[in-house]
Image (cartoon, rainbow, N blue to C red):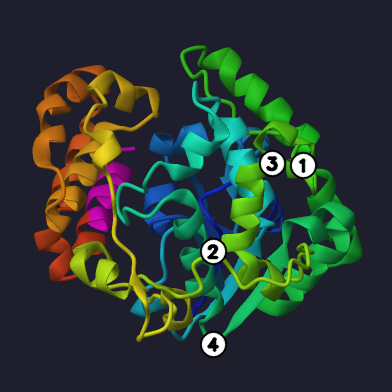
Amino acid sequence: MKVNKIILASPKEPCGATWLINCLLELGVMTYRDCPLALWVPFGAGFVLNRHNNHLAKWLPVLGGRRVFNFRQGIEVQWTHEWPNTSHQNLKIIYFARDSRDALFSAFKRDSLEFNFDDYVRFPDVFSLLDRIDNHRIHAESWLSLPNVTVVRFEDYKRDAVGTLRYVLSAIGVDVSDVDVERAVNSSTFEKAAAAERRYRERHPEDSRFICRSGTAGEYQNNVADKSTIQEIEDRCRPLLLRLGYPVADSGADAMGANMSFRSHLRSLSFFHPLLVSDSALGPPVVAKEYRCDLSWLEAKSADWFMCRNLSYYEYISLLRSIKELGIHPALALGRRQVWEGRKSYLDLIRTFLERPLLKRFNLSSFAMKTYFRLQALRS
């Protein structure tokens, strides 16, 4: 039977997409992240959760209340926070968006780091070496530029969860009764997710990171102390915010960095080579100013400082690799042993090898990761 594959894409920052994932699972729609076997193991006529993914019960309450899932035939939804690539071009995309100001502020509050909001948004993504504002904007615009995209907004879900779920189901061709829609929504509320997280943390007290936050639309407006940072996010993300229908101040000025080009930067990093990045998000081809990545301020940072950023060993090595590609500052490698000792994770170590640039160049990274997860699933 031919399977209709749907991509549920969202920014890496909190946007409410987990609500939709839980609703889809409640309605019997198979969802997964890397590949089906990484998440689901065949069990009789149905599927059970791969034991290596029991941690997902922390933010998906449906996984705590049901063991065997009997999924609908002919449809599957893969969720991702990653960048779009050529495999996504001809697929139906559901893009779950949120106001950039709220999304970045909520990510800062969730991570609970010992840094201020301004430092938080300026820390570079370990792969793209863009700060959180530019990374968020270009990532979102790249997904939105694909030909078959349906946009779902966090604010719409908060205002009318039933109507939003109905809208998504219509877009992906799933027909369910009003009773089932109501049941899925009632089983996927913030209160249910927060209770699931409490139960998980009671069983795993070593896990101190909170996922569920009672995010609200316009939360950034209460962040008076970081008003200048919020204003900068609005200025730099103005075209994206307007495209998604979010209100912005009518300053009469063009978006900050409108004459900035990111083209040379993206050409320099192998991370971007297999990706589909929106041409409009990269700035005009003829510009007065070309973006230059300045990471000199990282030179004085210790390995302890990087561990406070919650970087895994895999992310730390990826950051070093990206910096080396640009030829900016290789001295950070001095702390890699200390980071490894502090963040020792063999899965991270395996990912470090599987995601190396050589595999990326031949587009083998995805295959290698899927093979690894399949082997993990077979051991379950």
Q: Are marks 2 and 3 in contact (CB under 8 Å)?
A: no
- The answer to whether residue 15 of the structure is visible from this angle is no
Does the segment drawn in magenta span residue 194?
Answer: no
User: What amino acid does circle 2 point to?
Assistant: Ala
Whole-percent x and y of residue 74?
Answer: 56, 75
Q: Are marks 3 and 4 in contact (CB under 8 Å)?
A: no
The answer to whether residue 65 is left or right of residue 45 is right
The residue indicated by pointer 1 is 219
Q: Is residue 113 above or below residue 321?
A: above
Chain part drawn in magenta: 369-380
The answer to whether residue 166 is left or right of residue 210 is right
Dot 3 or dot 4: first in sequence order is 4
- Gap in Å between the C-alphas at discs 2 and 3? 29 Å
Q: Are marks 1 and 4 in contact (CB under 8 Å)?
A: no
Check disc 2: other Cα within 10 Å, few if <14, some if 14-19, many if 20+: many
- The answer to whether residue 88 of the structure is visible from this angle is yes
Q: Answer with the quarter of the image where residue 186 lies.
A: top right
- Gap in Å between the C-alphas at discs 1 and 4? 32 Å
The residue indicated by pointer 4 is 147
Q: Nearer the viewer, residue 342 or 114?
A: 114
